[in-house]
Image: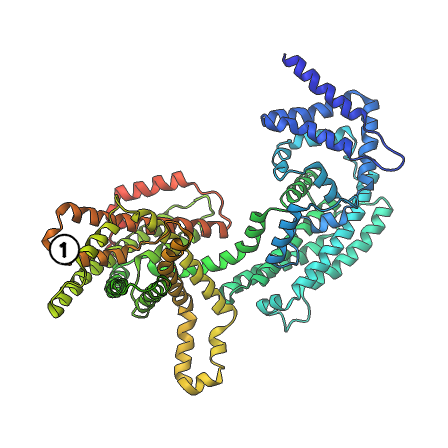
Amino acid sequence: MATDAVYSTRSALLTILSGMSAQSEEADIGHLVHLVRWLKVGATGSDFEIDRRFLMWVEVLVQDPALRAQVKDYLEQFLQESKYRYTFAELGILGSETFGQALKSRLFQRLLPATVEDKTVRESLNILFPKSDDHEWFDKISMEAWLRLFEALEWNNPDHPLWRRIQHEMLEAMEMLAVRIAALGIEGEVVRCLGMSDRHTSPFVEQHMELRKVIEQAHIQLSEQGRLDELGGHLDVLLDQCTDQIRKAHAQARLQGLSMALSLQLIRLEQSITRMRILLQLLGALPVESRAEASVSFFRTLVREENRKHSISDLWRSYTEKMAMRITEHASQAGEHYAAESRREYWGIARAALIGGFFIALFAFVKVWLVSLHLPLLLEAVAFSFNYALCFVVVHLFHGTVATKQPAMTAASIAAAIDSAGGRMRSYDKVIALVAQVSRAQFVAIFGNMVLAALTGMAISYVWTLAFGFEPVSEDKTALLLHSINPVTSAAVPHAAVAGVCLFLTGVVSGYYDNLCLYERIPLRLRQVVWLKKILGISRLQRFANYLEGNLGALMGCIFLGIMLGSLGFVGLILGLPLDTTHFAFSSANMGFAFQSGGADIGWWTVGMSILGIFAIGAGNLSVSFALALYTAMRARGVRVIQGGVLFRKLLQGFLKQPKLFFFPPSK
């Protein structure tokens, strides 16, 4: 049976190859389509099957010289007729459109594919590899198999007319790339970021001038069947200078902020420079170990980029990764304040947590009062949002802390430590030490928030009863508050997870506004506002601008978090979804109100379940927020692989060896 299957596969291949022949007008791509489909049949099996089919094709060509000559003429005619320059210069490189324009274009292309008019390589790839995952099986063809095909078709000779034809197209593509690099390099935002306005020359412009010389010499050498060895040496140096300028721009962005437009320009510059180097290597102007292998790798890249050209996820990733890096960079800097390295820092975080717990209990009591007013649903959502937002702003103004806001910041710090360790965790000590510092800071913040919020809630309820002669929380309301934090009979834990998503988004918003404050130079602009100078005076305005420079992101994050926590229940009610949020610190205050109002009527079972519910809500808030923040920070830094199992074992060993360090800092 196996022999029959092999014979059938070989027979189908011979039928396809026999139809390939050079035509007087133009080569029909249909024969190549049939060959690709025949190869693709092996994609459903193992990698070995795909490679086996490709090698079977090579073997057939080697064994039958007449058929080999026929197929060779067909392929060379097809490749000679193809147009390369626009594919080489544009495929896989971001366009100049905005994100909205690019998204609209990709959606439209998915609904109505583009017509095939010119015989460009891109259009041929679209016909040969129409599915978005075709590049996956195509990549499984081994490099050895490709090199054997090149040898069978005698394509290893650099003086082959086909290579000369493609080399001329490469020169035209490089001209397009050089013009793009020069234009992007002198864009206003790039010049401002790099501070090059006072320079007479720019490496982005100089590389274009140098390329013109390279192209002129290359055309002469190609016409004389000469070599292009080391022709691009000086151009490569200029491209290195351009790359250094891009690195400088990213470094400056940490201090000056980064806009989406500037992010896109830097991405296009990086992609264009990378493509220029690849073409220089394929051209022979820069050294490369094997031009044949480099050609195959480039061909695979083109297939993958053509397959993914309509991918919305790829578009989003390419547009947001650099911006996410800047946002998480600011979050990482904020996260450094939530790592307790010394006992002084530890007790400072504890003091801030007590302040946060006190104010949270006060505003939780205000929310209980707002509920008793039975306002219309929309007004109630607005009132809840204002109450939450004001609470978080007040806590920040009084230098307090809310424990649930820490994970979004500390996750960025841990991601930065992993990134500096090379992503593959070559050095665990720094990461484990940071995790221990973050863990004890998180522990004392949670404990401080929870205990003081609960105790303050009980104190408020007790004082209210003494002052007015009745409990501020009715018997029915007490039962409702205790039910809302029960981890078994209520939806407290799922709602805590939803709140964790809100807390993660708060970190993103804070980082965004920190970046915006730097990029738009908001403090400098405020100092120039005439009417503010008249109202506040120069010295007060100076202090106000300085305060916003370091706190705008945190304040906007507080407001955003308050709006989400206060209005999400109303949104869920409108949509008919069980959508709501539960925050562990506010729940702790509610537990204090209920315990004081319920008194001796509350049994020990209810007390135990309530405390367990508070811990479950806190775990939901913290774990979801931390996981999302860590994932975002890792993706933004380009860390794709972590030796998570090894890291977990190292952390466990460290915890078992010195568990105290994860809850309390050392004496020195």
Place residue 510 in its image quadrant: bottom left
Please give the count of numbered marks on the rendered protein: 1
Kindly identify the residue that appears in the image at 62 percent across and 49 percent down.
107
Q: Position of residue 475 (x, y in %)?
A: 17, 56
Q: Position of residue 90 (x, y in %)?
A: 70, 51
Position of the C terminus, as image quadrant, is bottom left
Q: Amino acid at mark 1?
A: Gly
Q: Does residue 75 appear to the left or right of 182 in the view shown?
A: right
Position of the N terminus, as image quadrant, is top right
Q: Residues within 10 Å of mark 1 (few under 14, many from 20)?
A: some
Q: Position of residue 488 (x, y in %)?
A: 26, 43
Kindly identify the residue that appears in the image at 80 percent across and 21 percent down.
64
Q: How is colour applied across the structure in the image?
A: rainbow
Kindly identify the residue that appears in the image at 13 percent across and 47 percent down.
604
Q: Does residue 239 appear to the left or right of 17 in the view shown?
A: left
Q: Is residue 213 visible?
A: yes
Q: Residue furthest bottom?
A: 534
| 45 lies above or below 456 | above
Q: Residue furthest left?
A: 600
Place residue 44 in its image quadrant: top right
- On the image, numbered disc 1 is attached to which residue? 598
Q: Position of residue 197 (x, y in %)?
A: 63, 72
Q: Is residue 286 visible?
A: no
Q: Does residue 606 appear to the left or right of 409 in the view shown?
A: left
SS under mark 1: helix
Q: Does residue 69 appear to the left or right of 252 in the view shown?
A: right
Frontmost residue, 329 versus 374: 374
